[in-house]
Amino acid sequence: MNREQRFGKQSGIALVLTLLAISFLVAVTLQLMITVDRQITVSVAQREQVRLDGMVLAGLNLARAALAVDRRDNAFESPQDAWATLEPKQFAHLSEDVELEVTVSDLSGRLQVNALKSGVKEEYRQIWLRFLTSGRFAIAGAKEAEDLLDAIADWIDEDDQERHGGAETPYYQTLQPPYVCRNGPLVTVEELLLVKGMTRALLFGDAEHEGIANYITVQGDNGMVNLNTAPLPVLQALSPDMTEKWAQELIDYRQDRLHNELLAQSGWYRGVSGFPISIEFSNEMLVVAGLYFEVRVRATLNQFSRTGTGILRRDDNGRQTLLSWKQE
């Protein structure tokens, strides 16, 4: 091989090495750009999440303020209260680009699961039976409803005596995996899924039925129902003679601003035009003021969102206690 051939071969190798080096540098540069871009995206996401977390907490404080204003103005709940009329447009001044939604629900209008304990009034149990067998929920009939109420009572009472259709620890020990009966108040609504006879379809609904979860609560155990905030299925269950039509009439009546002051007394339902005299609610089971409230807050910014859910207790003196708060 002469000198020119050796030079040409060396030049070719050098060119190949140069191209390889350039290719390597391009690949490294692209990877660096991708990494930097990803870090920027993550940084932006973290920044927005921090903003949204702050807005969610602001929403909680707005709910607390609304509940405080309501207690200052009156001693009963109504659809006209500050906490019941919170709308996103009221919070528009807080941020130009973050949408804030705050929803407060009075849990005293729901049926109390923990009131189904030993010694529960038969009248309250009958309300539950009418509620469960109304046709709205995935339950076969009265027998299944009776057994479920027995099982719930066994779950929350402190003894180990099994009711006719109920279950105590020996039954739950036969399941896979085995577990023990709580023998105490339920802590969450979801805990009902551990109780004999409860199904996800009944609790949360299915394609053909509503779920009972939105109409019940584990807060409180006195068996009282707030007539001013009870949803239609609960209102309909308060009396065997109640119909869906009259339950809706009660809702329409209490939503009318002209009737607001009348809601201070639990007997206001008698003022509903044409309300059947045969329908009588027990005054011992009715209230018009709330004690426990559920707060739901959602903050949204472009594709990002954060939510917060909690339970507030507001005493008669207006003092508030945050019993639980979950942010995600």
Image (spheres, rainbow, N blue to C red):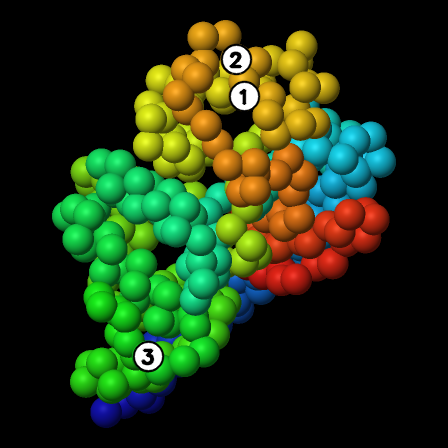
Mark 1 neighbour density, 10 Å: few (under 14) some (14–19) many (20 or more): many
Q: In the image, which disc is placed on residue 161? A: 3
Labelled pair 1, 3 in contact (Cβ < 8 Å):
no
What amino acid does circle 1 point to?
Answer: Tyr
Question: What residue is shown with label 1?
Answer: 269
Question: What residue is shown with label 2?
Answer: 272
In this image, 257 relative to 234: left or right? right
Q: Would residue 209 be visible to someone looking at this image?
A: yes
* Residue 234, quarter of picture: top left
For marks 3 and 2 on the same chain, the one whose residue lies earlier in the sequence: 3
What amino acid does circle 3 point to?
Answer: Gln
Q: Position of residue 296 (x, y in %)?
A: 58, 46
Labelled pair 2, 1 in contact (Cβ < 8 Å):
yes
**Residue displayed at 74% across by 58% down:** 321
Q: Position of residue 194 (x, y in %)?
A: 31, 70
In this image, 60 relative to 192: left or right? right
* Residue 7, quarter of picture: bottom left
Q: Position of residue 72 (x, y in %)?
A: 84, 36
Q: Is residue 120 above or below residue 24?
A: above
**Residue displayed at 56% across by 42% down:** 284
The one of 103 and 97 positioned closer to us in this rendering: 103
Q: In the image, which disc is placed on residue 306? A: none
What amino acid does circle 2 point to?
Answer: Val
Which numbered disc, 3 or 2, marks the residue closer to the eye?
3
The one of 191 and 47 positioned closer to us in this rendering: 191
Between the residue at mark 1 and the residue at mark 3, the CA separation in whole angstroms equals: 40 Å
Q: Would residue 296 be visible to someone looking at this image?
A: no
* Residue 15, quarter of picture: bottom left
